[in-house]
Amino acid sequence: MGYDPSKWASRREESLFEFNSTLAQVVIGVRRSGKSTICHKVLLEHGIRYSYVNLDDDRLLGMEAKDLNTVLSCIYQLYGTDVPCLFLDEIRLYPFSFSEYCAYHGIDTSGITTKAEASRKSAFMDYIVTGGFPELQNLRNKRGYIESLITAILEKDIKRRFKIRNMDALRKIANHLINNACQEVNYDDMSSIFGISDKTCKKYADYLRQAFLIQVLTKHSFKSKNRIRNPKAYIVDPGFQNNRENSMAGENIGWRLENVVYIELLRRCAYDFRDVYYYKANPRAKEIDFVVCDKDQAIELIQVAYEIDTPKSFGRETSALIRAAGPLHCDHLTLIAFSPTRDVVVGGKTIHILSATEWLLS
């Protein structure tokens, strides 16, 4: 096909492909995160002959199940009958992680000089504004790209699939959730704001989740009814927050860092089949941003804060971890912040303070 994969960015998910499996494997993820590219890359690098069909082609619009035999016939005519297997094992692909972003832009991720550290911090500040969509990196008109991407997600991935009629409400809900990333979703408020039922608000939010525009974080609880209440919404890539119309996300770096950490946790936990929740003992309690669980056992509590340099901010974040350690029976306590990596002992428990950039690059 004339591709040269040696010039393409390497992705961590490449290791998840199983070429000796007889099962189909599926690569899923948000639009333009590089799903097609990673498939081309691994197939070419492993010397596997394959056929290619772009089912997003407008000429295939309206295709039904009865038309698949026609498509298969065309594949045989174009590529021969020796076609490869499909992919099924649900490799979830995200836009560039911060580590992949640095690799793409040639950022020194291991140097210990002041210059190297400053370069990494500068790259992170760019990353939480620009985001990690591969095609976006060298574009001047980033807003045009993001707006066209959101339109494609809403029109092609949601409207067509779920037969949406009230597209204006869907767009408003999408913008609302993006603007309020890292916050609890209040469907009653959304219903009042947008003049539609809370049931419709829940459906539309779930459609946005299925299209990978947002990711939902549920509360840690051993009761199922509590886990489905008060979910928090995050966006799959920070580039969505600024580069679009109706962008009122603000400049809260703490929330942006929290969003990036959650998406990175999803990447990492997928390899070990672990789950991530947030924890809040009661409505007035300080919440724990992330609880990483292996089945029903909490194995790490993670708090995210941009600034912990003052005694007040340090005490607020560390005390929340200490209070949650007992009820959750977990002593692996982590605080991710823009602060030097070190261990501190608070209330008789060790808290691992990790530099945000070091953690993201580890």
Image: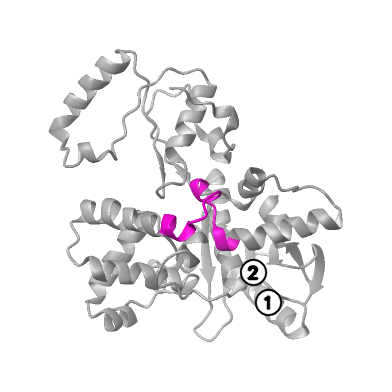
Report x, y in % for residue 226.
Answer: 41, 72
**What's drawn in magenta, residue-wise?**
128-146
Q: Earlier in the sequence, mark 2 or mark 1?
A: 2
Q: Give the residue at mark 1.
A: 317
Report x, y in % for residue 278.
Answer: 53, 68
Image-based side of 20 in relation to 155, left or right: right
Under circle 2, the secondary element is strand
CA gap between label 2 and label 1 equals 7 Å
Q: Is residue 94 visible?
A: no
Report x, y in % for residue 251.
Answer: 57, 75
The reply to whether dot 2 and dot 1 touch (C-beta < 8 Å) is yes
- Snapshot quadrant of residue 62: top left
At horizontal 24% and vertical 69% (from top left) the residue drawn is 168
Q: How crowded is mark 1: few (under 14 residues within 10 Å), some or many (20 or more)?
A: some
Residue 112 lies, with reference to residue 258, above or below; the image says above
Image-based side of 55 in relation to 94, left or right: left
1 or 55, nearer to the observer: 1
Under circle 1, the secondary element is helix
Image-based side of 216 in relation to 307, left or right: left
Reply yes or no: does residue 26 show up in magenta.
no
Q: Can residue 2 be seen in this view?
A: yes
Q: What residue type is labelled 1?
A: Glu
Residue 139 lies, with reference to residue 44, above or below; the image says below
39 or 220, nearer to the observer: 39
Dot label at residue 303: 2
At horizontal 73% and vertical 67% (from top left) the residue drawn is 338
Q: Residues within 10 Å of mark 2 (few under 14, many from 20)?
A: many
- Snapshot quadrant of residue 125: bottom right
Query: Which quarter of the rendering shows the N terminus?
Result: top left
Reply yes or no: does residue 137 show up in magenta.
yes
